[in-house]
Image (spheres, rainbow, N blue to C red):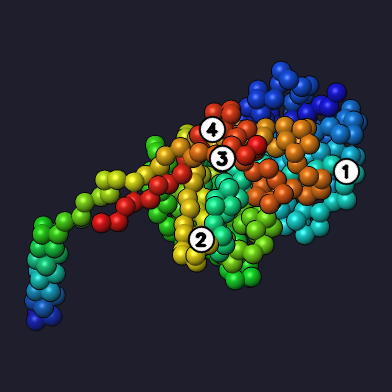
Amino acid sequence: MTTVHVVGRGIVGVRLHRLLSGRRPVMVHEGRWHDITGTSPGDVVVLAHGGDVADRVRQLVARGLHVVTVGDSPTDALDLLHDPPEHLGTSLVLGAAMSPGLSGLIARHLANQLATVDEIHVAIHGTAGPACARVHHRSLSGLSPGYRDGDWIDFVGGSGRELCWFPEPIGAKDCYRARISSPYVLQHAFGDVSRISARRSARRRDRFTAWLPMLRAPHPEGGVGGLRVEVRGADERGARQVAIAGIAELVGTAAAATAAAFVTGVLDGLVHEGLVVAGDAELPTVELLSRVEAVGVRLQEFTGIPQP
Amino acid sequence: MKLLRRILGALVIAGTVAGGIRLKGTGGVPPQRGGWRPLELPDER
């Protein structure tokens, strides 16, 4: 029977194990799990630990394993999107967390309601475990990618403040450009879109200390986090339309739910072979979103503010 | 001395204008309707 190997015993790894166990064999591995001789072709490996994973992914895919990544490394995203590994009929899901991951599924769902899509803007609030918090801290000091009219622009991390409204109880948060991989992943899935951006919420202290090492150890888990996906385009008559949806949930829970949806999707044969990113038009987006909702993550849409 | 008087005068005028705006101005009424609702997924599975 196919075994699911979850690598990493952090918040996401433990929660993913809880969601998947009971119906199929699931093994959780500590650290980076270097000895993969116990795997069989067709097994699913979920890389739920921090750090770069591109080389690791190539090694696992070459062994005939399905691979699902949960991390948010722009370096990995660029590497694997530009040079996807040769596969043996298996799937490589790049980015199956809250963002990238759930953000792509929501973007595709919103895009399907419009005739054309020009812009996708993602905002995230909160972190999962300590590894996620460290990525958040570092992301505000690096160059952050933005896509405009066919060109990638490197913005200064921590710039571009925008007040973004998340579902309650989060409400409005100041969000800033950051070094996160979502724009790369979304651009791969939405090749015709002319503008893509991703921002994350931050406090003044986060931005001021971003260039320093973390001054104190991160919390075991962040509080309630949020995701907001805004898709701009036009309807059949050419009228401008904006569709917004998001979630308010613990980031680790949302990430684990998304990873679980992709893992079960792979096992059920719903996910195509080769490189897969959330938001791919080929994916059964509604089915995957339903699986995310089935484990308690509540998807919400912004109804807009009626004009007088 | 003349320069000091001018600076003080400018500060007094600026403070008076700012105070007037602060007292007279209203921030408007925040939106009372709209917001978020559960996203209903189509049953196309």
Quarter of the picture containing the N terminus of chain A is top right
Q: Amino acid at mark 4?
A: Val
Q: SS at mark 3?
A: loop
The type of residue carrying mark 1 is Gly
Mark 4 vs mark 2, foreground winner is 2
Co-location on one chain, circles 4 and 1: yes
In this view, which residue lies farthest toward the bottom?
A: B2
Spatial distance from mark 3 to mark 4, Cα to Cα?
17 Å
Label 1 neighbour load within 10 Å: few <14, some 14-19, many 20+: some
Side of A5 relative to A167 (left or right): right
Q: Which residue is mark 1?
A: A89
Q: Identify the mark at residue B42; answer none if there is no mark.
A: 3
Q: Is A51 displayed left or right of A252 in the figure?
A: right
> Where, by quadrant of the figure, is residue A254 drawn?
top right
Q: Which residue is mark 4?
A: A297
At horizontal 76% and vertical 32% (from top left) the residue drawn is A268
Q: Secondary structure at mark 4?
A: loop
Disc 3 marks which amino acid?
Pro
First in residue order: circle 4 vs circle 2: 2
Res. A127 image quadrant: top right
Judge by depth and name the residue closer to the eye, B8 or A179: A179
Q: Which x, y percent locates residue A241?
A: 46, 59
What chain does badge 3 belong to? B
Task: Tell me residue A90's x, y (percent).
Answer: 84, 42
Q: Which residue is mark 2?
A: A235
Residue A262, image x, y percentages: 70, 37
**Real-space Cα separation, disc 1 to disc 3, in angstroms:** 31 Å
